[in-house]
Amino acid sequence: MAERRRWGVPLLLLAPGLALLIAMFIAPLMAFMEYSFYRFRRGRLTADYNLDTYRRFLTDEYYHVIILDTLKVATLVTLIALAIGYPLAYAMWKINRPGLQRWLGLLIFSPILVSVVVRSYGWTVLLSDQGPVNWALRGLGLTDEPVTLVFNLTGVLIALAHVFLPFVVFPIFSSMTRLDPSLREAASDLGAGWWMTFRRVTLPLTLPGVVAGAQICFVLSLGAFVTPAMLGGGRVLVLPLQVYSATSEINWPVAAVGGLVLLIAALLAVLGFNRLLRYSEVR
Amino acid sequence: MSEPDVELAGVTKAFGSFVAVRDVSFSVPKGSFFSLLGPSGCGKSTTLRMIAGLEHPDSGSLRIAGTNMAGVAPYRRPTNMVFQRWALFPHMTVAENVAFGLEAERTPRAEISTRVAEALALVGLATMAGRKPGQLSGGQMQRVALARALVKRPQVLLLDEPLGALDLKLRLQMQLELKRIQREVGTTFVYVTHDQAEALTMSEAIAVMNDGRLEQVGSPQEIYDRPTTRFVAGFIGNANIFAADFVPDGEGATMVTLDGLSFRARTDTPLSGRGHVALRYERLRLATGTTLARAVVRDAIFTGSAVHYVLGVENSAVELTAETPYDGTVPLHQRGETVGLSWDEAAPRLFADG
């Protein structure tokens, strides 16, 4: 009796979410995956089950490049977001004035409040050859020729790092606020200056925040579609774009396998980051 | 006499409108075990943190080993600190924690490993070098914190209630251990505690603080026997404290009068006017012969090695507590029993209001 009562309430609470997940996500996913075994020839789908599409993804150079580019974009975006996000989180932590921190937090969060389409158009304007960024670079004498910042990889990286920045900053900031202030005092008391205190105490103890932020940023970057589509200028062929164009040609098998590869990449990334998280946490 | 290791003169520190430390001056002799004692919030920790350089005095001067410390960062001071909750680096092993301070001053690697081993042996943790703080007990973490500070061979070791988080048995054991280590290394210890028994047991000198002010500095016995303020009399040991009237008796002593009770008290100088009188529990004697007063036993509290009697003085509203040692040979006085009460003329401590 007691056993059943202990399970009853959690199951009841789980039921709506579970039902929604099965009906709207897992069932369609299974159906979609079935298409991955179909044959697509001359614009027509036939239901003779085979592994041709999988074989192509595994052996065709074309798909290898796309998969590697997708991983490269996600890695670079994550690194850039970390390089900007860590100092930002550190500054926010050091400010130590709750009012100012709230405003700064809102500012860092702001990219997410703007629609992705609007944001991407904004970047095309800002980063164009005649745009304010190039104007500033020329004004500072850093360049004579306009630098191509958009409709290529650079534009995609800038825009993705911008929008995923909050996902990196907040976990790092929260790991900093959890840091026992007496640890830094102890380091200083033991003769460590700022740099040694940072390198030996602050950074290692905020690594869990770094790993958590990197994980979210990397997985979101893998699945990013609108930004590479609008700012890549057709030169950044990431997997989500490939899946999109395949569906528009009703090439279901390629779309399905592409989706599956993305899912596997995301799962592997999550597993890898969780592993790192376990190492970075103090036992 | 050699120069004091730590010297505070008129040190004041405020946080916003709250004055944590007011005009505090004292000096700590070289090689001594010096305690800062007081209730929580009295400013003792702030004082210690100012010596460490973690807080900066608003006014007054602070000298360590003769050098003025104004504007000297914590990492440049010849002091090291054992923090309240020890503040061990949780991601480093015991040996790495202890080595940290030596690496900061770029000690050669070979010397680091010998000194770390020495320090861990001193605190009895030689076999724990490879463990992480999370795998240690409270007492062991306390020892690591001590080793980590001592390995730097500081001029002055600062300890901020290091035993506060330990249970009673372990605390008593660590008190003796700390004393032993202090004798062995000969370093000056400045020790913050709110536990008067701890301060009395361990210190050569005690500075009692209350409400940001320094109340009294002296040896444990001085502080206990001759408290100079009413606060010290009440904070250290157990004392009956009453408002009373003082009149010089013309023979160099003072007559003390309070509600239906009048007695002579020997004082350095005769006092007059209103004030307070403090009588320690254990200085009161339950006597049969000539007595100063008669009283009815209202309650008898048995504590094992002693008995506390709550006594109502006859023809008076005064209630006193007396402590008598218990050795099992004399039967306890019962509630309702009338007893005679006396004390030595030197026992009462008088504090004039003013």
Image (cartoon, coloured by chain):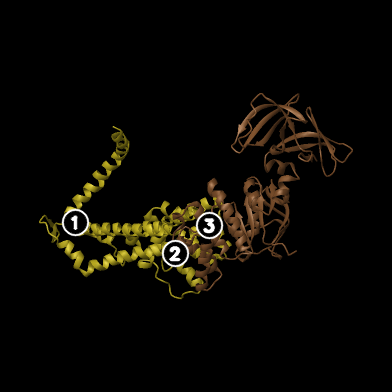
Chain colours: A yellow, B brown
Please name the amino acid that badge 3 sits on.
Answer: Arg
Can you give x and y, in whole percent of width and height, for residue B119 in the image?
53, 64
Q: Residue at x 45, y 57 (%)?
A: A172
For the residue carrying disc 1, how many other residues have a C-alpha within 10 Å: few (<14), some (14-19), or many (20+)? many
Please name the amino acid that badge 2 sits on.
Answer: Ala
Which badge, 1 or 2, comes first in the chain's sequence? 2
Q: Is residue A225 visible?
A: no
Q: Which residue is mark 2?
A: A83
Q: Residue at x 51, y 63 (%)?
A: B121
Q: Residue at x 57, y 62 (%)?
A: B150
Quarter occupied by residue B151 = bottom right
CA separation in Å, label 1 and label 2: 39 Å
Front one among A118 and B342: B342
Please name the amino acid that badge 1 sits on.
Answer: Trp
SS state under label 2: helix
- Chain under callout 2: A
Q: Which residue is mark 3?
A: B143
Figure check: A56 above or below A26: below
- Chain under callout 1: A
